Each structure stands twice: as structure tokens, then as C-alpha cells.
Amino acid sequence: MNRWALLRHEINNNQICDIHYDFLIENGKDCLTWKILNLPEIDGIAVDIKDHINHRLIWLSIESKVLSNNRGYVQRIDNGTFILLESNLNKERFSLSLKGNLINGVLKKNGNFCQLFSLNNQ
């Protein structure tokens, strides 16, 4: 099954105050993962997206969790299934049709930028 998840990751301690989002897509044995500082709006401008270390598959089903070792708190924003709109998944450039509870659209990634389009404007 092709699953995805969008997680809000908040780190707030004496040394760091960081809020970002982790976008995960199932990739067999783990999840390809990217860090997004600002969420893209449907049919809006491109936003920065950065490669992040692959996450374990369990993160596709976790709703919220306090992380150990002062690594913060994670809250799932949305999740669902995806369809790859190309012949293979290239981590640098891809288009995915996302079907989630809140997000339904096409996510296009090109290098360090991504955009989210409504299904009508792809």
C-alpha cells in the first residue's frame, strides 16, 4: 500500500525553539522523509522542502507522541494514500496524487521546492 503522513514536529526547550513539518511517504521498508518549514497552500506558491533522514514505517500510524531525549513533540496533521504520477519515484523530482482526510491534491517536488495543486489544476 502507498501511504503518506504529514507530521508537525515541535521542539521547545531552553536551547531550541523549532517547529517544522515532516512529510513521509512509504517506501517499502521505511519512509522517505522531507522537512518542510511552511506548509504549501493548495494552488499557492512553491515552498522549501529539504531531504531528511528516512523514518520508520510506524510513523505513518502514530497520531501523537512525546519524543525522548528532549527531541520534542510530534502531532499528525494528516495522512492517507498516494498514487505516484510517474513511472518511478525519484527523491529529487516527483508528482504524487494525495488522498487524505484534509489534503486531497497533487504534490509536485522539484529539487528543494514543492507545490500543492488541486486535482483540477494539475
Image (cartoon, rainbow, N blue to C red):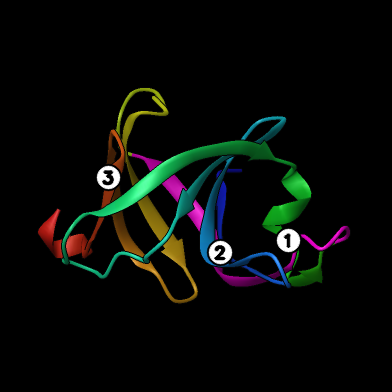
Label 2 crowding class (10 Å Cα cut-off): few <14, some 14-19, many 20+?
Answer: many
**Residue at the front extreme, as displayed:** 15
- Mark 3 or 1 closer to N-term? 1
Given the image, on which type of amino acid does mark 3 rest? Phe
- Residue 115 in the image: x percent, y percent? 24, 54
Q: Is residue 54 left or right of residue 68?
A: left
Disc number placed over residue 79 in the picture, else none? 2
- Mark 1 or 2 closer to N-term? 1
The residues bearing labels 3 and 2 have C-alpha atoms spaced at a distance of 21 Å
Q: Residue at 31% x, 50% y: name it.
A: 48
Closer-to-camera residue (71/109):
71
Residue mark closest to the camera, 3 vs 2: 3
Q: Are marks 1 and 2 in contact (CB under 8 Å)?
A: yes
The residues bearing labels 1 and 2 have C-alpha atoms spaced at a distance of 8 Å
- Stretch of the chain drawn in magenta: 68-84
Depicted 105 relative to depicted 10: above or below? above
Closer-to-camera residue (23/10):
10
- Mark 3 or 2 closer to N-term? 2
The residues bearing labels 3 and 1 have C-alpha atoms spaced at a distance of 26 Å
